[in-house]
Image (cartoon, rainbow, N blue to C red):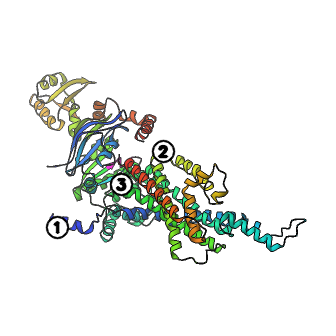
Amino acid sequence: MSEAIKAINLTKAFGKFVAVDHINFEVKEGEIFGFLGPNGAGKSTTIKMLTTVLKPTEGTAIVNGYDIIKEPAKVRNSIGVVPQEFTADEDLTGWENMMLMAGLYGIKKDVAKERAKELLDMVELTQAMNRKVQTYSGGMRRRLEIAMSLISRPKILFLDEPTIGLDAQTRSAIWNYIMKLKKEYGMTIFVTTHYLEEADLYADRIAIIDHGKILAIGSPKELKESVGGDVITLNTSNDDETMKLLQNLDGIIDIRKVDNMLRIKVKDGEEMAPKILEKLIKSGVKVLKMSITEPTMDEVYMEYTGRKMRDEEADSKEVFALRRTLRRTRG
Amino acid sequence: MVTEIKKKEEYIDRSPLHGLWTLTNRELKKWYKSAVILLLSIIQPIFWIALFGKAMNLQALFSGTTLSIPGLNIPKNIIDKIGQEILKQTFGTTDYFSYLAAGMLSFITLFTSMQSGMSMVWDRRLGVLDRLLTTPVSRSNIIISKVLSSVIRSLVQATIVLIVAVLLGMSFYPGINIFDFLGAYAALFLMSFGLSSLFLMVAIRASSWQSQMAVMNLLNLPLLFTSNAFYPVNSMPSWLKPIAEINPLTYSNAIIRGMLLGIQTNLTIDFIYLTVFATFLSIVGIILSWKYISS
């Protein structure tokens, strides 16, 4: 399978501050690739480089087979971008915004009209399309942004924090549209988020980024396994015997007795549970209770970044300060 | 796959100018579709012309007066004649209202052109610019569309001012023809193009709309008062003359008065100056803006 995106030592420095620090990754064709990290980790800067808005200080990336530095025009032709901000023109209607985008991609009127109808229908904005965008709700605006970025039928869609600031219900609705795009059009989707549970639920693969560096890449499952696997909790008729029996079983990382329960750390819980049961039943130990728990993305995130995502969100002052600095150094 | 590529060529326009009109039209749409903004931007120059222009009536000061100097028995027609000559000497015409109206055409063009940067400041703030930069529209078209929409707005506003001025009593010189109007518009076009580019360049680096407004307010009245919009350069104090002589407004006023009112001026020098001014500023402005948004 070929790659849709390949970043090679991609780096962006604003003065002395290195926002993105020699990152390397590949995004496969047709997958949803989640870029996960706290505010100010370098997510938006990476997207801006991949979409040719910012020029890298060092390194490059290949998007749809085109080099972002040498062939930016070709890259722009083949991608769609949903920026973090609402970029639709508030003074124009939803329909006019769609036609504006079509004009920017040089799509002829009749084709554009057809596509705009289809896309607005898909994001359920047909009824609101002749209203000015300033009357739209947050969710409607985000949907319009997505429709706008699809008018050129891009092969890759970049979404920068598509669900930020939306309520839970709207967030899941937005994700439904994203999943639909993947399924129906086979589109490659590169999405940044700082919602752990969203990355976990919807992304095929995730990259965790912090301080401009990629700390881990893999499917949600792989990432969770990498932190130490699942935990099987057991309650048996004879715990001491069980501990002895299981000690030498392959695939078991650690066994401990905690609060009258046996906590067994294993690589793959679903695979190990039947093996454990079989062994215990053969040896005549009765199993009273059993449960498998997977590690959550929170644990994965904590393992790699050394902190909780929640702490990060609380510290918004720091983020604003950082953004101000970035703006100044850019000027 | 092959049919798909073929199809693509049919519906995609990839000329170097593609997107230019789409973007220009976007700016203009906001302006002509919003009745309030359109009205407000037209009302201001009308105030200038109707209130200021009609109130500051130098003509009435020098002609048709009941002036009589005690002890001297000067006939009224001689006093009127002297008044007329003073006006003619100073302004090149006895019709001060028309003189001022011509100056207002340049002023409204200056004022509107200065706002070229505001929409750029907003586009940057709201993230619209970031989105535009990800589309296949070339960077230069993004910038030129801003300049172009500003120029079109300026010329439309100037036309409205001209119509109002005529309704209020502005009169052209007797032998006026279509080329005189074209010449006057060419002058306005050049000035507007230069100024719009300049203010776009300022805006693209401005950190906020407040600072952009500050720059505009700082410059618009001084530019107006140091030009020949209200009074001729000849009657200015010696320290002000050199400033007036580099002010582009002075040249566009001279051209408009020369073309529409028949007031003597050296059109060749005026046009050369304005062309150099517009070319220089638009090249510098567009290149610097382009460099900035491309980095």
Which amino acid does the dot numbered 3 rest on? Answer: Arg
Residue mark closest to the camera, 3 vs 2? 3
Q: Which residue is mark 3?
A: B139
Question: Which mark identifies residue B133?
Answer: none
- CA distance separating discs 3 and 1: 31 Å
Subunit bearing disc 1: B
Numbered disc 1: secondary structure: helix
Q: Are marks 1 and 2 in contact (CB under 8 Å)?
A: no
Residue mark closest to the camera, 1 vs 2? 2
Q: Which residue is mark 1?
A: B3
User: Quick check: is A11 in the magenta stretch?
Assistant: no
10 Å crowding of disc 2: few (<14), some (14-19), many (20+) = some
Query: Is the residue at mark 3 from the same chain as the one at mark 1?
Result: yes
Subunit bearing disc 2: B
Residue B54 shows in this picture: no
Q: Which residues are magenta?
A: A159-165
Q: Which residue is mark 2?
A: B207
- CA distance separating discs 1 and 2: 48 Å
Q: Position of residue B283 (x, y in %)?
A: 41, 54
Which amino acid does the dot numbered 1 rest on? Answer: Thr
- CA distance separating discs 3 and 2: 20 Å
